[in-house]
Image: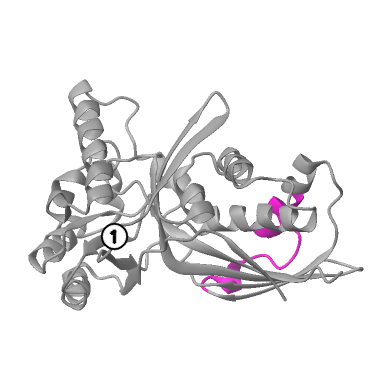
Amino acid sequence: MNKNFSITVPGSTSNLGPGFDTLGLALKIYLRVKVTIEAQITHIETSGKGAAGLPQDERNLIYKTYQQGCRFLEVPDQPLRINVHNEIPLSRGLGSSGAAVVCGLAIANELNGKKLSNQQLAELATHLEGHPENVTASCDGGFTVGCLANDRLYHCKIMPPPGLHAVALIPDIEISTREARRMLPEFIPYSSAVANIQRAGLLVAAMSSGCFDFLREAVTDGLHQPFRKRLIPGFDEILAAAYSAGAHAAFLSGSGSTILAFVSENAEEVRAAMIEAVEPFNYSASAQILELESEGVRIARL
């Protein structure tokens, strides 16, 4: 039987302001992989975003995660030919590592009789990644709410509201999740925690009901964004420009450095305004208009 196949995994934005390590949203920007069974040695070809810096051997995150999936399934791994085309900018808060982890586990699952349910795949991906928000969005698509408790993943998917789009400003600044977490204080005031709970709940309600007018207040955050924004010169000015151009909401995507805005109209105006706001701060950035993705990881036979 021909076991060659392709896998498409969406990237994602996470946190969405107040939903730290909880909220994720899949975007139409993809990790695309073709897998061919090889009898000799593993060979990995890479193209697209960050391709030059990606390992092309068994150190590659996709292959390492495939091996971890095989160990979980208690089956031996095997040499593979993997052709990777990546559209997701690396270390920019758009879920590139989460997508790679989901992809590696999906390869192991596909080659071993699909023994993992989607729930098990998402749960294992969460354990490997350390938090649920990006991997649940890549697994399921849509707007996801995730919680890891007592080694069990609880997560729900909400279909994104129609008419909502994203504008992603992507600075030429790499920020690792580990580096960004070092920016966070050990303790926060009780009032900040309460404020985030209120706004995270409001954000879920607004995304469920399509109340776009609530989004600006709903993405207000006091847990991580006030500290991480120091890594991005002009952060406040970029947000102000997005709002002035008509964005419903703007926030740090994941741990950054991408800044994401929600729009229903004026996407091009918001994109241009965010790019213009970067100019006084002496670094380069690109900006993309992205659609929200309602589907998660997909597998097709070749």
Query: Residue drawn 58% across and 42% down?
Result: 119
Here the colouring is one colour
Query: Residue drawn 39% across and 39% down?
Result: 22
Residue 36 is inside the magenta segment: no
Query: Which residue type carries mark 1?
Result: Ile
Q: Position of residue 213 (x, y in %)?
A: 12, 53
Would you place residue 18 above or below residue 39 in this image?
above
Which residue corresponds to mark 1?
Answer: 259
Give the quadrant of residue 273.
Answer: bottom left
Relative placement, left or right, of 233 versus 143 is: left
Query: Residue drawn 75% across and 64% down?
Result: 57
Residue 59: in sight, yes or no? no
Would you place residue 286 above or below residue 235 in this image?
below
Would you place residue 184 above or below residue 67 in this image?
above
Magenta residue span: 49-67
Label count reads 1
Would you place residue 146 above or below residue 104 in this image?
above
Q: Residues within 10 Å of mark 1 (few under 14, many from 20)?
A: many
Residue 275: in sight, yes or no? yes
Relative placement, left or right, of 76 versus 183 is: right
Quarter placement of the C terminus: bottom right
Relative placement, left or right, of 268 versus 144 is: left
Query: Residue drawn 73% across and 47% down?
Result: 69
- Residue farthest toward the left in the current orientation of the protein: 244
Q: Secondary structure at mark 1?
A: strand
Give the quadrant of residue 264.
Answer: bottom left
Front residue of 291/208: it is: 208
Relative placement, left or right, of 173 versus 4 is: left
